[in-house]
Amino acid sequence: MPALVWTPATAFLALLAATLAMTAPAAAQGKLEAHYDVTLAGILVGTGAWAVDISDDQYSAAASGGTTGLLKAFAHGTGSGSSQGRIVNGALAPATYTATISSSKKSETIRMSLAGGNVKDFVIEPTPPVDTKRTPVTDAHKRGVFDPMSATLLRVPGTADPLGPEACHAATGVFDGRMRYDLRLDFKRMETVKSEKGYHGPAVVCAIYFAPIAGYVPDRLAIKYLAAQRNMEIWLAPIAGTRVLVPYRLTIPTPLGTGKLEATQFITTATPKAAAKAQ
């Protein structure tokens, strides 16, 4: 989404992709199929779908979405992303990542390969022009990071109920092919959620903070706005049979009103180990 012209709405949609980037080691086996609505000041501006499949030793995640309703008439855009990797000693080990963002004026695809938490290689097609205003991304910035789609899972360690304050004690570094940034969570409260189809139960609400590190234009309004926000929230719900939590709702204040991503369908099922190995 960095290639799109900024508006408060597109900035919100950009952080939605980033927010599917709060990650930690994952274990157990389960699946998620979810649909989301994106609203701005109560008006529907986008929809999306998200699927996660965790087996005993590998995982895959995929998301797609686009603008709709009134926003589509002014700033048409679609996006999709996917990632695959292995689970090693209970931790995600991302291997490949692909994302495509398209607007009415252009399309851009990012491909990335990773190993051991480090970016091995990445390419943006078509090659973007050099922007000397961007802060440089060094090799050090590409170490110890997750790609945005591999970072769709947050595992709560221990044996206690994962839906509690400990779930919000998380921070991670993300590299999206152009920008390196950090996301940090802090516990706020507990809530109960009920989707139109699927999950009905507790969710843990965390404050979410965005900090750009490299690969961004310091004077860009969207970056300044998101980095300054102290009222953003992410609501996390569980994948059945696991200690993994995923975003159910995200709210971000904008100059045009509150932006919100919320699940309308959140179907999650545990996968027995024997069945998973037979697949």
Image: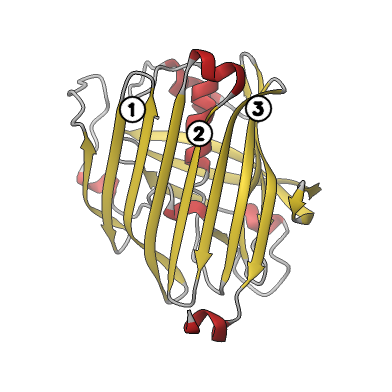
According to the picture, the residue beneath numbered tag 2 turns out to be: 15
- Mark closer to the observer (3, 2): 3
User: How crowded is the residue under tag 2: few (<14 C-alpha within 10 Å), some, or many (20+)?
Assistant: some
Residue 228 in the image: state x and y as whole percent. 54, 24
Q: Quadrant of the N terminus?
A: top left
- Residue shown at 55%/37% (left/top)? 209
The numbered dot on residue 28 is none
**Mark 3 or mark 1, which has the lower sequence index?**
3
Give the camera-side residue of 15 and 274.
274
Element type where label 1 sits in the image: loop
**Mark 3 or mark 2, which has the lower sequence index?**
2
Element type where label 3 sits in the image: strand
The reply to whether the C-beta atoms of the residues labelled 2 and 1 are less than 8 Å apart is no
- Mark closer to the observer (2, 1): 2
How far is mark 2 from mark 1, CA to CA? 14 Å
Residue 27 in the image: state x and y as whole percent. 53, 72
**Residue type at tag 1:** Tyr
**Residue type at tag 3:** Thr
User: How crowded is the residue under tag 1: few (<14 C-alpha within 10 Å), some, or many (20+)?
Assistant: many
How far is mark 3 from mark 2, CA to CA? 14 Å
Element type where label 2 sits in the image: helix
Give the camera-side residue of 130 and 277.
277
Task: Say left or right for 63 vs 235.
Answer: left
How far is mark 3 from mark 1, CA to CA? 26 Å
The numbered dot on residue 39 is 3
The reply to whether the C-beta atoms of the residues labelled 3 and 2 are less than 8 Å apart is no
- Residue shown at 27%/24% (left/top)? 134
Residue 86 visible within the image: yes
User: How crowded is the residue under tag 3: few (<14 C-alpha within 10 Å), some, or many (20+)?
Assistant: many
The numbered dot on residue 216 is 1
Residue 232 visible within the image: no
